[in-house]
Amino acid sequence: MTAQNITMQEKDMSRVHARQRVMKIAVQVGLYAFLGIMALIVIFPFYFMLISSVKSMDEYRQTVQTLWPRDIILHNYVDAFKTANLGTLFLNTMYVGVVSTILSLVITVLSAFAFARLEFKGRDAMFAALLATMMIPGELFTITNYATISAFEWKNTYTVLIVPFLVSVFYIYLLRQNFLQIPNELYLAAKVDGTSDLKYLWKVMIPLSLPTLISITILKMMGAWNSYVWPRLVANDEAHRMITNGLRNAFTDSTGDVNIPVQMAAVALVSTPLFLVFIFLRKYIMKGVSRSGIKG
């Protein structure tokens, strides 16, 4: 092979590498442009909510919406807190969320431990039946749950907001998969030492599965905070009203007009706790879900 041929091959390789670099850069630019557009689409509703919450009613009613308010009216937030009685709504929602989360964690931990470590007849069949219920739309359970709580006369009580959703098959599955990743030799060694199942669960399995338990706690609290259909159906009285239902008609006057800026301010106040949870605790959610694995 002559030197001229070697030189031509080197030039061809250089052109190929240059084209590859250009294609790589073009793909990256296109990818980031797509992600940027998607991010704007997701963020814009939140931005519109925030700027609307500090507008006057006259400015909001303009045919063409402004992307920045002419006058920033922060008093809308004070009016929102007083008009919707947000203090009571926050307390009701926190009470239901905390109690239901604690009870749900107890049920989830015990159930996941039983399906992961205890040997009993029909265990796998029972777990498969539980997983099968995840295929049923949640709306169908609303009918049977409503008939049940009506028979028990639980309407307009905290009980009806807490008890029907204490058991989550998804949380049990998630924690069971995490428990299965803990070596069974630890359990057998603990049994040889005379350790009870509950002590082994408390001392070994719960500490090792803490990220998943934190994820379940966060998701359960967020579910209680965002719940709308069920509370409105069974406990929409003033004493038990949840925060999502309290914002529904709180800003409608006698003529049927809705004070949208004040309502937007209330929505911003309600969304703030969830936003903070996502910002500061998102790593626990991702870590807990990723640790669940696929072993089974």
Image (tube, helix red, strand yellow):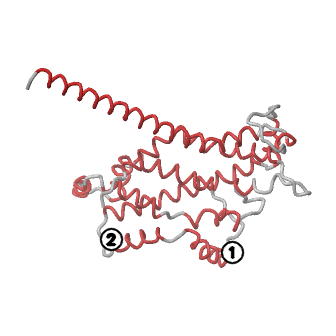
Q: Which mark is residue 267?
A: none
Q: Quadrant of the C terminus?
A: bottom left
Q: Secondary structure at mark 2?
A: helix
Mark pair 1, 2: CA separation? 36 Å
Identify the residue under disc 1. 153
Label whose residue precedes the other's in the sequence (1 or 2): 2
Q: Position of residue 42 (x, y in %)?
A: 59, 44
Q: Residues within 10 Å of mark 2 (few under 14, many from 20)?
A: few
Name the amino acid type tagged 1: Glu
Q: Of residues 259 and 114, which is closer to you in this image?
A: 259
Q: Position of residue 34 (x, y in %)?
A: 51, 41
Q: Say whether residue 265 is left or right of residue 224.
A: right
Name the amino acid type tagged 2: Asp
How many numbered marks, from 0 up? 2
Task: Give the residue furthest to the left.
Answer: 1
Q: Residue at x 19, y 25 (%)?
A: 8
Quadrant in which residue 13 is drawn:
top left
Q: Quadrant of the N terminus?
A: top left
Q: Say whether residue 3 is left or right of residue 25.
A: left
**Up/down of 172 relative to 7, above or below:** below
Q: Secondary structure at mark 1?
A: loop
Q: Residue at x 18, y 27 (%)?
A: 9
Q: Residues within 10 Å of mark 1 (few under 14, many from 20)?
A: few
**Up/down of 58 relative to 241, above or below:** above
Q: Position of residue 65 (x, y in %)?
A: 78, 41
Identify the residue under disc 2. 124
Q: Residue at x 33, y 49 (%)?
A: 204
